[in-house]
Amino acid sequence: MFLFLPFFETVHARIKFRWLFPRIHRLKDTTIVISGDEMNFWHKSSKRILPGLAACLFSMSVMSATCESSPNEARTLDFDKESLEAAKQNWQSTAHRLNNSYTYIRVQGSMTGETYVTLVRFENSELTARIYKRLKVGVKDGKRHVEIREAWMATKGMKRLFGGEGGFPGLSMEELYDACESEVLKRDAEKNHVGLAADDRGVLKRCYYSPKMCADDCGKSYDVSHFYPESISDEILKEYVTGPNIELKK
């Protein structure tokens, strides 16, 4: 569900930020209140404030969808190696059933309003497609507007397929698990915001850390936002790369 801000005239507005992803941990339990005398400032400044704030909220809502994008809801796991290994075993069973053919999407939000989307497709354990989209979400003429600032699709034989340019690299689910263990799980939970979650299929829905004293992008995340238990066709992917959507429309 996407969040939008109307032009406030006579009502009070309270926008409650939840603890959604590492980049905005510092906003946890922060409440923005707009009322009374502040309304005059809001009215005069709305043309400047609304696009950026709405874009920020859109990015936050996109990231919050990571727990709800699959039929099987993510289960929060204990932040330890045993829990991660158990989830990985579930994934190995799923991968065998799917013949290691699947597609997933990872999303990274930005406080500037940009959203970075990476889609990865595997067929029989082989990486066969990677899509990158850089979107700018804001408000235009009072309506939500998505600008596609960059978008491309790489397939077999192309240098962009594996990574090094735009978005996340084309990692398999097994590689995501390995990176989660080696780069995230070893972090001190007392000094970092941490999270670990997977669904019943073993899809790694959350794996991140972010230093508690950091006010910028200091952490690391291996979250899978959307998962599809099949290798999506080239035809669907070619249509997807040209549109502003984050999720696939099949």
Image: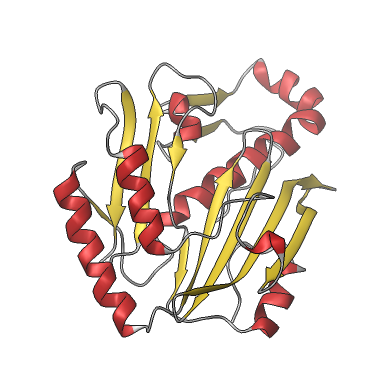
In this view, 141 is above or below 159: above
Tell me the colour scheme of the image. Answer: secondary structure
Quarter where residue 199 is shown? bottom left
Residue 191 shows in the view: yes
Quadrant including the C terminus: bottom right
Residue under the point 45% across and 24% down: 26
In this view, 129 is above or below 174: below
* Nearer-the-camera pick, 84 or 54: 84
Q: How many marks?
A: 0
Residue under the point 58% across and 64% down: 119
The x and y percentages for residue 215 are: 51, 19
The x and y percentages for residue 196 are: 29, 46
Quarter where residue 235 is shown? bottom right
Asked if residue 219 lies left or right of residue 73, the reply is right
Residue under the point 72% across and 24% down: 42
* Nearer-the-camera pick, 111 or 175: 175
